[in-house]
């Protein structure tokens, strides 16, 4: 414990991102990167097309619900950093306190101040990936989480010891207080790839994403639609798999469980990988458990955006405006042979590899493509 009446004062410092924060930023980027690569492959990055999209009112109706919460999150986080720029973290033999100097306007806001007496602390744990100390109460709920890199030493009282601030860090003070419950939970012992629970989840997520990447490249068939009806089975599967994973993660290794925050983040990340895996693997499952792949006759509509089946029970093939020039070059009465499969839950999937190849050939040299594809015929 600290010597009697010894007090450390730490002030706010600008620090770099923790490992967990880097993961939080990296994951959305890694998920969006394949989307942009795919969009670039299909030449969706034409300036005229982006202008039409931005001028469309529908795009803002769909994106604002996502942009506004993200913008509010950034503003709130910036506000929190601004409010805490003049705060102080005071540690003595009675407890740890978060306060503001008397000249600060925030010193009058009592709800911002925190006071944690050592007598109210059941245990404390150092989280290496977050580089912070988490305090737990007697009910095992989190009382306070302090990130070490946010604070730098300002002064030590009494000051008769010739100690340089650079020689003392916040972690060293906590170690001197002997607040860590045992050596196994002391700093430096926890690592995502060393703990069996978090390592298993991370490796499982990587394995699923690798499978999805390679299988999606090799697949020639795809779902007929991308809507709630077709997504619902995959959402249900992902939810059930997430519940099982959460239960298994909480039940495993009770003697030395990983931090709950990190486990929860990994479980949420795994839920998205379950959803993507179910969506990709469902196509393969339909190939074995669904009906046969049949050849059906289709023809384009008057708007050159969809292929309409001759047999009304089959689904429509929906295209985008990017292929409109090609389909308008085909006659309305020109029948296209589309490979269709009816799978589980009555969900259809197409093999449009021949149509895709014909569209690519047309885009390379539109004036030279006057012969219908091999899978088409005129009646």
Image (cartoon, grey):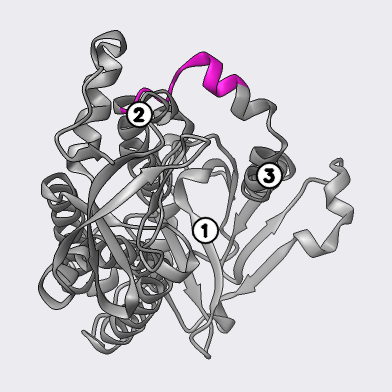
Q: Is residue 292 above or below residue 323?
A: below
For residue 146, the mark is 1
Spot occupied by residue 121 in the image (x, y as percentages of width and height):
52, 80
Residue topped by disc 2: 330
Left or right: where 197 falls relative to 173: left
Highlighted magenta segment, given as a residue range: 42-51
**Within the image, what quadrant is residue 358 found in?**
top left
Q: Is residue 186 above or below residue 319?
A: below
Left or right: where 110 falls relative to 325: right
Q: Are marks 1 and 2 in contact (CB under 8 Å)?
A: no
Dot 1, how many residues are within 10 Å of its Cα: few (below 14), some (14-19), or many (20+)?
A: some
- In the rendered image, the quadrant that contains the N terminus is bottom left
**Within the image, what quadrant is residue 209 found in?**
bottom left
Question: 244 or 232, which lies in front?
Answer: 232
Separation of disc 1 and disc 2 at Cα? 66 Å
Q: Is residue 296 magenta?
A: no
Residue topped by disc 3: 64
Spot occupied by residue 235 in the image (x, y as percentages of width and height):
40, 72
User: Which callout, 3 or 2, points at the residue further toward the start of the chain?
Assistant: 3
Separation of disc 3 and disc 1 at Cα? 34 Å
Q: Nearer the viewer, mark 3 or mark 2?
A: 2
Separation of disc 3 and disc 2 at Cα? 38 Å
Left or right: where 75 falls relative to 331: right
Dot 2, how many residues are within 10 Å of its Cα: few (below 14), some (14-19), or many (20+)?
A: some
User: Which callout, 3 or 1, points at the residue further toward the start of the chain?
Assistant: 3
* SS at mark 2 in the image: loop
Question: 179 or 347, which lies in front?
Answer: 347
Residue extending farthest front: 379
Q: Nearer the viewer, mark 3 or mark 1?
A: 3
Question: 374 or 33, which lies in front?
Answer: 374
């Amino acid at each position: 414990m600290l010597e009697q009446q010894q007090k450390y004062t730490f002030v706010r410092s600008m620090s770099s991102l923790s490992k967990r924060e880097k993961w939080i930023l990296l994951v959305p980027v890694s998920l969006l990167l394949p989307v942009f690569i795919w969009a670039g492959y299909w030449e969706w990055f034409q300036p005229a097309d982006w202008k039409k999209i931005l001028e469309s009112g529908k795009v803002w109706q769909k994106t604002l619900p996502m942009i506004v919460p993200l913008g509010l999150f950034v503003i709130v986080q910036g506000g929190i950093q601004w409010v805490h720029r003049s705060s102080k973290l005071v540690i003595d033999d009675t407890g740890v306190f978060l306060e503001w100097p008397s000249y600060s306007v925030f010193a009058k806001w009592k709800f911002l101040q925190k006071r944690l007496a050592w007598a109210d602390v059941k245990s404390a744990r150092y989280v290496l990936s977050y580089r912070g100390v988490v305090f737990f109460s007697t009910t095992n709920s989190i009382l306070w989480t302090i990130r070490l890199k946010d604070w730098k030493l300002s002064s030590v009282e009494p000051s008769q010891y010739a100690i340089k601030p650079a020689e003392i860090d916040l972690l060293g003070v906590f170690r001197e207080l002997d607040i860590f419950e045992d050596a196994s939970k002391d700093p430096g012992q926890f690592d995502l790839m060393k703990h069996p629970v978090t390592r298993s989840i991370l490796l499982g997520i990587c394995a699923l994403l690798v499978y999805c990447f390679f299988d999606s490249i090799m697949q020639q068939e795809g779902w007929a639609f991308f809507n709630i009806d077709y997504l619902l089975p995959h959402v249900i599967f992902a939810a059930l798999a997430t519940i099982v994973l959460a239960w298994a993660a909480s039940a495993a290794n009770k003697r030395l469980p990983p931090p709950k925050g990190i486990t929860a983040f990994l479980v949420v990340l795994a839920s998205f990988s379950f959803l993507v895996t179910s969506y990709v693997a469902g196509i393969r499952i339909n190939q074995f458990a669904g009906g046969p792949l049949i050849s059906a006759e289709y023809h384009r509509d008057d708007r050159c955006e969809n292929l309409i089946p001759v047999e009304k029970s089959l689904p429509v093939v929906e295209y985008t405006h990017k292929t409109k020039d090609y389909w308008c070059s085909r006659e309305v009465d020109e029948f296209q042979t589309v490979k269709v499969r009816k799978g589980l839950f009555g969900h259809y999937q197409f093999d449009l590899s021949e149509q895709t190849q014909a569209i690519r050939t047309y885009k390379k040299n539109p004036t030279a493509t006057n012969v219908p594809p091999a899978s088409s015929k005129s009646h």
